[in-house]
Each structure stands twice: as C-alpha cells, then as structure tokens.
C-alpha cells in the first residue's frame, strides 16, 4: 500500500513545488526589478567614483573609509536612526492597547477605529506641515496649552531645540502610523478564536493571564510585522523631516534615509550616498534578523496544529 | 470580558480619539477660513468659514483629469496587490526547499527604501518603455512585502484540518486558495486594499520623476503644482490635504464592513 | 468555467491596454526641452519665446517643464542619468557650480566671443557671477539679491530716525527696537544669504585660491559672539537661524520684526500676508556698507543638448529684448539685461508702484556682492560651515570652538575628492 502512494506523492510533490514557485513569481519579479537590482546598483556605485555627468572610476573602499572614519555627520545620523527605531515599540504598544479596546463589543467601536486610523491616509507632507504648526514656538497649539496650564512661562521652540527636536518628530511620526499598527493588530486579534478565551476563563485564568498567554503569543507574527513597519515608517518619515526641520538643527533630526537623499540629490555625491545605502541596508537587515529571532523565527510564523 | 464595566474603555478611547483628532480639526478649520495660521492665539472655531478654497482648487488645475489618473493607477495597484500578495502569502505557508531564503529575501527587500532606488528604477522603467504611463507609475508598488506577510499570517491562522479535508476531497491548489482560504481572510484582503490604495494614492516622488507629460500627472502632484505661489500656510494647502485624504478615508469606511464580516466568519469556523 | 476565464482574459487585456496608455512612443521629430524653476504660472511669456524661436527654427519643437525647487535637482539629475536631460535649464543660486564642475554644462564662452556686443547688454558684475574656471556658463535669467526691509513704525516707536550706518549701529538699533514679542533684526539663512553680516565685518570665507578656510580669525569670533549674544537676548529673532523662508516672512508680516534682511521676492510674499504693508510702513534699503548676497536665477544649456546652436538662440531670446521683458512682467522680477530693466521699472511703477523701491535696490551696489564664491563644492562647504555657526549662534558652543570645528570640517571638504 505504501508503494503506489509514494509514487503518487512524488509526482504530486513536483507539481506542488512548481505551483508554489509559480505563486511566488509575480511578487519576485517586482521586487527583483525595483528593489534588488537597485540595491546592486547602489552596491556597485559604492566602490566607484561616479557622477551623473559621466565620470566613472574604481574607488575601492574610499567611500566606506570616509564614512566610518571622517564623517561625523554619519555617526550622528546613525545614532538618530537608532533612537527613532527604539521608539517604535512605544507606538506599537499604544496601538495594541487601542486595538484590544476596539476589539471589544462596546458601542461606537467603528467610530473609534476610524478616528484612530484617519491619520494614516494623510500625505506625510501634510502631516509635517500640521505638526510643524502644532509645535510652533509663538503660535503653536502645544505651547498655548502648556502656557495656559501654567507648565511653561514662555513658548519653547520645540523644533529648533537641539535635544527636543527629534522626540517631537518621533511623536508626529507615531501619530501618523499608529492607525496602521492598529489595523494590522486588529486583523490579527480577529483571527483569534473567542473559544480559546472562553476555555481559559473557565479554567480560571484572569484577563492579564489571558492576554499574556493567549493573545500575545498568537500575535507574535503580527508584532514582528509591526516592528518591520516601524522600520519602513522611519523611511516614510523622510517627508516629515524635510517639511518640519530639514534635518536640523545641525542634523539633530537627520536620519540615515534623509542624509542619503541629501548627499545624493542635493550634494550630487551619488557614489557616497550609495555606500551609505549599503550600510543602511545591512544595519536594518541586522535589526530585522534580531527581531525575527526574538519573535520566534520564520517571521514569527505560528504552527497551528489544533 | 463581558462582565467588565464599559466606561473605562470609553474613557480611554475618547481620550485617544481626541488626541488623534485635534490636528484634523485644525486642518478643517483653516481650509474653511484660510486664516494665517500664524495668528495668535490659536482659535478652535473658524472665524468666517467659506468654501472658496475648495472651489479654487477645482478650477485652477485640471483636477478631474488628475483624479482620473490617480484612480487608474491606484486601481491597478490594488488589483495587482491582492492577486500577487495572496499568491505569495500562500506559497510562504507551505514548506519547500528554499523557504528560509525566500523569507529572508522578502525581508531584506523591505530594508531598501524607495529614495535609494529612484535612478535605477527610472532606468529600468525606461528600458521597459513604460515612462509616462499608468503601468509605469503602478509597477513598483504592485506588490508589497508587508501585505504578503499579512496574508501569510491570516492563512496560517486557518485550521490545517480544513485545508487537509479539502485536499483529500481532491481540490487543486488554486481552488483551495480561492474557495477556502480567501473567503476566510476577508480582513487580510481589506487590509491589503486599504494599504495598497493609500500607498499608491499618496505616492509623490515616483510619479514626479517618471512623468514628463502634464496630462498624466496624479492628484498629489497636480495639487502641489497649484501650491507653488500660494505656499504652505494658507487655506489652499489645507483644502489640498483634505481632498487628497478623502478617498483613502472613504475606502477605509467602506472596507470596514469586511472587518465585521471577518469577525463573524471567525466565530463560525470554530 | 470557460466563460469565466474568457471574461478574465478580456478584462486583463483591457486593463493592459489602459495601463499602457500614455507610454511615450519613440519621437521622430526634433525636440528641445526647457526646464524652469518654480514658475508654472509663467505661460504667456513662454509662448512668446516659443513663437520667436520657431521663426528661426521651425523644425524644432519646444517642450515645457517646470519643477519646484525642492524637487528640481532630483528630477534633473535623474534625467541626466537616463540620457534625456532637459536642454535649457533655469537654475537658482549656486547649484550650477556642481554641474559645471562635473562637466554637465555647455561652455558658452565661444558663443560669447562670436558676439561681443551681447555681453554689453548685461550688468558686468552679474554676468561675472557665472564664470567658473574662466568659462562663462550662463546668461542672467532673473536677478535678485538681499536687501534690508525695515518696519518704519517700529523705528519710530524706538525713537530711531536714521538707518544704521555700520554693523555696531545696526545691532544697537535692533536692541532699541526689541521689546516683548518684538525683535529688532532678522535674516534669511538659506544658501549664503546671511553672509553680508560677515562681509560687513571684513571676514572672508576662504583664501583667494578657494582652497582653504580663512574665517577662523579673531574678528570673526568677535562678530559671531556679538550675533550670538544678540540672538540670546532676543534682539535677533531666533528664526533667523532655525527657520526656512516661510517663518521669517510670516514673522515680519505679523509686524514683530524691525529689520528684515531678505531677498527681493520676499517682499511680494510677505506683503500678500500683511495688508498693512505699504510705502509708509515698510521701507527698503541696503545693509550698511551696501553688502548683499545674490540669489539669482540663471539660464544654462546642458552638455547633452543635441542642438547647441539652436539652444544658444533660445538663450538669447530669453535673456534679451522682448523675451526678457515678457519674463520680467510675467514673474514680477527684474532681469539681468540693462535696457530691459529700464522698461520693466517703468512698467512696475504703473502696475506695482509699491514694489519699485524694492526693485531699485536690486540694481544698486552690484560691486558689493558677497557670498557667491565659485566653489565646485559650494553645497558641501555650506553644509560643513552652517551647522557649526548654528551651534554658536544658538548658544550650544562657544564662538571660538564652533569656528575652529567649522574650519576643520570645511578644510576636510575642500581636500577630499
């Protein structure tokens, strides 16, 4: 009985493999064309002296040397990027809270859900302009409120302040992205069967234990996803930074991505920017792999053998 | 869960909602009255509301043409995303040699921000003779890794027993995806639609670089042309924001029904 | 099942056809493109240029492009890499140096030599501004430079009768006008617009051979310390050093700044936000010493242009005669052409009389232009210098340390490849 089944299995298996690869192909093509090839383009450029006007010579590791040993701005920007990423869990935790609350059966949850999400479809440029006004030293709403409450005597120039500028930008960025985290986590929460909670409740588990033992583990793949979204959000904040602070004051709000763009298109040093791109890529890849490990590997896939 | 009092939940959500809403109130107010937003003290209600700015925008630029352009590009992007991402997401739920490498590959693609791909992407689009076209604008975002993983997570949450039963019944892979997995992943589809739409609708830098023909511009691009002289802090800018924001919001409201549908199906499938 | 696939097939084909709509086919006709910098409303005048151009070159079609300043260089450089660079370009400020130094622009000197009368039409100091390594790369398009706007009411309130005659007087006048929300002085800071403050104090940025920093001198330290103290005391509005051009213009429009060092286009801009601005309330003058930084637009030809002689003809149309006049009236600016400006001033005295005093300053003291060195790495030098200056002016570092650090960084930029 095993013999004929094995034959059948083998033929079926190749067909299955073929189908799987076929399913992957369209996306693979797009990524190859628009991500992977550009990455290689950047890689090749990073070891050359190149200008859009035709010059092209081999440069070896010149740009990397310049970056690591002589470029103070690079290290500053790298540090800013790390700080930016470190604040992602805050936004995710907030979004998780909101998602859980919205997932209950309370009335008006649709309204709350929509309101929290509304900030995401707004163009980042617009978000930057709005928040720039909110933070304005003389006429911004935040200063107005703080002064009225007596916490401050004079307006604080948030976006011109060397230490406060970055947290302020981060806050604006969290405001924009929290809705995104929320719908991702919500779609995950809704995939958890209520039966699981009921069984646990019957077994005597309280809400906190239910959250910790059931919700969190089942949300792991999506929490990992949210972290990755946090990374992408740091890229999207590009527009936010250019509108609010242009990376200032004195590179206090410059991230790797804005620095790369400035160096490439404003200073016309595409080769140096390419080297920074490679470093940026490796940095975030490392970060993602770390996050992957922490959330269980395989992009946090959950083996559901129920 | 049912025994808990409602009001703390409402309180927290109300607080969060008002925080999220304040910037919008401000945008709406200024777009209606066009005051210099640098007037002090900041007031919450518009002083002389008027719809001038919305009408102005409509007439000064070929608004309708740009709207159509954006709509076509977004339609292509959304359709492509649903098809490609669900396929790839499904493939990633199966075990096959090279799966680890594939996941790693997809993850690393996410670490490549758009801004560093501008020039090579332009050259590639040029090679494919797609400059200045809808497809050229749509192609780079026709599949996104996040949405693939959303589908993957959604498919994985479906009990294996269902799939195995279907296989024993002799259904082909296609059928399994179409008839069983997708209907049970309504919220993942909704998420895909919303996100793909927002990303393609708000896309600014890419159309800017590959469109040379005025007629083919998308809405964000067209509106920003309008803002050239009337820079930044005026009601026109805010009318612009509102008009670009609305379609995404409307789509979200429409797709919300799917969230609810997903909820009930989830309860039924146990 | 068959019909469903048929439907899918047809939909797919329709989709494909629609998607490919607009993809540009190969062009058989001769084309030249003109890329301007943020003047999309300038249509009438542009049409005049094309008509004039087609009289001499009926076989060449002109394509019009326009991009905002923030996107201009991204668009242009992408097009260069793709081999489809716009042929005639309008660039603001010093960006052209980057491209000229890398061989991306056409050297106009041979053309200028063939027509020696042409150069006489332009202000020599202005034309000189576009020479790099002995080669002329551009003709003037729209000229603008910095000047001092002053709030006459605030001067009166502080009991000040005359405009300051030197740097110290300027600081003390500013101090007298500072009260509460109001500050005495403000400046724009993009590009090198703030440099006149340094030129007034006899400070040079680089050595004459442009190879080394020359600004780390006791004079400079003293000047920076004065400016820093003034900033901290609110005499100089902080936005001068942290804002773009929006915030300073708005602050002046709100009537809270006594002296505003800005470029000419700022006038119409803040005037549109401040109904109280007119000849009685706002005056236009020069900075003490007549120093100013130019921020002009120039018109140049890309090296990759296929029809350089035709492009040169277009340049002449744009920069002289009726073409330049149309540009001036269409954008409310002055051009680099002496005769045309005379006509434009007449025109503005009838249509925009309030702007005439402002525009007149643009043509005076052209020998006192500063902040316009022909450095290939202009943007990088500025990037190395300005953040350190900010550090000093905003009180983060002492002037001595900031200037020393800036010197180190600028020298590094000038030395590296």
Image (cartoon, coloured by chain):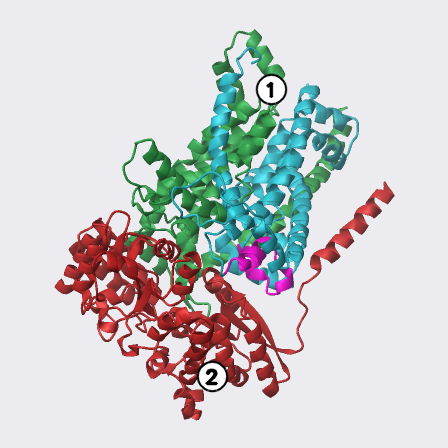
Chain colours: A green, B cyan, C red
Say if A183 sits above or below A262 in the image: above
Out of C219 and C216, give the one closest to the viewer.
C219
Say if C207 sits above or below A291 in the image: below
Answer yes or no: do the residues labelled 2 and 1 have beta carbons within 8 Å?
A: no
**In which quadrant of the rendered image does the N terminus of chain B lie?**
top right
Out of B217 and B151, give the one closest to the viewer.
B217
Q: Residues within 10 Å of mark 2 (few under 14, many from 20)?
A: many
Res A105 label: 1
Name which quarter of the figure residue C160 lies in.
bottom left
Name which quarter of the figure residue C400 lies in.
bottom left
Region of the chain picked out in magenta, as a range: B205-228
Report the residue at 50% width, 46% height from top: B30
Secondary structure mostly seen in the magenta stretch: helix
Magenta segment includes A99? no
Report the residue at 55% width, 33% height from top: A115
Is A22 positioned to the left or the right of C384 in the image?
Answer: right
Say if A58 sits above or below C320 in the image: above
Instruction: Give percent across and percent down for residue A220.
Output: 52, 28
User: Which residue matches tag 2?
Assistant: C320
Magenta segment includes B214? yes
Determine the CA span between mark 2 and mark 1: 74 Å
Report the mark closest to the observer, 2 or 1. Answer: 2
User: The residue tagged with tag 1: helix, strand or loop?
Assistant: loop
């Amino acid at each position: 009985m095993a013999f004929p089944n094995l034959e059948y299995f083998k033929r079926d298996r190749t067909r299955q493999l073929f189908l799987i690869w076929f399913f992957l192909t369209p996306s693979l093509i797009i990524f190859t064309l628009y991500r992977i090839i550009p990455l290689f383009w950047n890689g090749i450029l990073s070891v050359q002296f190149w200008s859009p006007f035709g010059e092209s010579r081999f440069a070896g590791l010149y740009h990397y040397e310049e970056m690591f040993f002589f470029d103070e701005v690079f290290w500053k920007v790298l540090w800013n990027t790390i700080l930016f990423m470190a604040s992602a869990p805050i936004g995710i935790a907030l979004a998780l809270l909101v998602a859980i609350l919205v997932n209950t059966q309370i009335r008006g949850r649709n309204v709350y859900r929509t309101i929290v999400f509304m900030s995401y479809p707004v163009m980042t440029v617009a978000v930057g302009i709005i928040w720039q006004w909110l933070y304005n030293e003389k006429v911004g709403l935040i200063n107005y409120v703080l002064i009225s409450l007596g916490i401050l005597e004079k307006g604080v120039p948030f976006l011109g302040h060397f230490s406060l500028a970055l947290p302020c930008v981060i806050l604006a960025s969290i405001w924009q992205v929290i809705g995104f985290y929320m719908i991702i986590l919500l779609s995950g929460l809704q995939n958890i069967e209520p039966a699981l909670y009921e069984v646990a409740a019957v077994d005597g588990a309280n809400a906190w234990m239910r959250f910790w033992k059931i919700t969190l583990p089942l949300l792991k793949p999506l929490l990992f996803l949210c972290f990755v979204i946090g990374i992408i959000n740091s890229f999207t904040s590009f527009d936010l930074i250019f509108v609010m602070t242009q990376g200032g004051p004195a590179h206090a709000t410059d991230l790797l991505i804005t620095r790369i763009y400035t160096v490439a298109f404003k200073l016309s040093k595409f080769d140096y920017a390419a080297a920074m791109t490679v470093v940026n890529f490796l940095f975030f890849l490392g970060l993602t792999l770390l996050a992957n490990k922490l959330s269980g590997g395989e992009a946090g896939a959950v083996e559901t053998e129920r | 869960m049912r025994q808990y009092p409602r009001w703390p939940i409402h309180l927290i959500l109300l607080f969060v909602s008002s925080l999220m809403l304040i910037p919008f109130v401000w945008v709406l107010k200024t777009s209606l009255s066009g005051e210099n937003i640098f007037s002090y003290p900041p007031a919450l209600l518009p002083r002389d509301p008027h719809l001038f700015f919305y009408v102005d925008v409509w007439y000064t630029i070929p608004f309708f043409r740009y709207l159509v352009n954006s709509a076509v590009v977004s339609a292509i992007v959304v359709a492509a995303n649903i098809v490609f991402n669900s396929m790839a997401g499904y493939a990633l739920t199966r075990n096959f040699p090279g799966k680890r490498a594939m996941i790693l590959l997809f993850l690393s693609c996410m670490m490549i921000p758009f801004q560093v791909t501008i020039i090579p992407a332009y050259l590639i689009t040029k090679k494919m003779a797609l400059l200045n076209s809808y497809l050229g604008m749509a192609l780079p975002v026709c599949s996104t890794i996040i949405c693939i993983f959303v589908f993957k997570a959604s498919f994985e949450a479906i009990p294996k027993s269902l799939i195995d039963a279907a296989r024993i019944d002799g259904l082909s892979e296609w059928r399994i995806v179409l008839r069983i997995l997708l209907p049970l992943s309504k919220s993942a589809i909704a998420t895909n639609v919303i996100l793909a739409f927002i990303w393609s609708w708000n896309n600014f830098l890419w159309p800017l670089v590959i469109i040379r023909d005025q007629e083919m511009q998308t809405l964000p691009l067209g509106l920003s042309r309008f803002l050239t002289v009337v820079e930044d802090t005026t009601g026109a800018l805010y009318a612009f924001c509102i008009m670009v924001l609305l379609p995404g919001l409307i789509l979200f409201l429409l797709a919300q029904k799917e969230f609810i549908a997903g909820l009930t199906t989830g309860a039924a499938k146990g | 099942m068959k019909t469903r696939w048929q439907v899918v097939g047809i939909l797919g084909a329709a989709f494909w056809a629609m998607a490919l709509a607009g993809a540009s086919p190969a062009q058989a006709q001769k084309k030249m493109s003109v890329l301007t910098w943020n003047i999309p409303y300038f249509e009438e005048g542009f049409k005049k240029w094309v008509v004039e151009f087609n009289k001499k070159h009926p076989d060449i079609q002109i394509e019009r492009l326009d991009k905002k300043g923030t996107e201009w260089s991204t668009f242009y450089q992408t097009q260069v890499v793709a081999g489809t660079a716009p042929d005639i370009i309008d660039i603001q400020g010093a960006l052209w140096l980057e491209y000229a130094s890398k061989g991306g622009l056409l050297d106009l000197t041979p053309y200028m030599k063939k027509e020696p009368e042409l150069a006489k039409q332009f202000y020599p100091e202005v034309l000189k501004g576009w020479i790099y390594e002995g080669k002329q790369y551009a003709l003037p398009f729209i000229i603008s430079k910095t000047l001092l706007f002053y709030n006459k009411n605030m001067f009166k309130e502080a009991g000040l009768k005359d405009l300051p005659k030197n740097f110290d007087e300027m600081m003390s006048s500013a101090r007298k006008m500072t009260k509460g929300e109001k500050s005495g002085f403000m400046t724009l800071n993009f590009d090198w617009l703030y440099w006149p403050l340094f030129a007034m104090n006899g400070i040079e940025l680089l050595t004459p051979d442009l190879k080394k920093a020359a600004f780390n001198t006791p004079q400079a330290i003293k000047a920076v310390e004065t400016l820093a103290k003034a900033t901290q005391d609110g005499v100089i509005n902080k936005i001068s050093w942290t804002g773009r051009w929006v915030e300073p213009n708005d602050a002046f429009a709100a009537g809270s700044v006594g002296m505003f060092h800005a470029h000419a286009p700022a006038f119409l801009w803040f005037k549109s936000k401040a109904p109280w601005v007119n000849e009685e309330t706002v005056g236009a003058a020069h900075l003490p010493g007549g120093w100013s930084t130019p921020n002009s637009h120039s018109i140049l030809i890309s090296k990759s242009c296929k029809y350089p002689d035709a492009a040169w003809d277009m340049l002449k149309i744009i920069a002289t005669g009726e073409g330049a006049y149309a540009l001036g009236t269409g954008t409310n600016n002055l051009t680099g052409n002496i005769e045309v400006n005379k006509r434009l001033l007449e025109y503005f005295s009838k249509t925009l009389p309030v702007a005439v005093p402002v525009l007149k300053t643009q043509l005076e003291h052209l020998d006192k232009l500063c902040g316009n060195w022909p450095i290939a790495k202009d943007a990088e030098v500025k990037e190395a210098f300005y953040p350190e200056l900010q550090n000093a002016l905003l009180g983060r570092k002492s002037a001595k340390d900031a200037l020393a650090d800036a010197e180190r960084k600028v020298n590094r930029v000038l030395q590296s490849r």
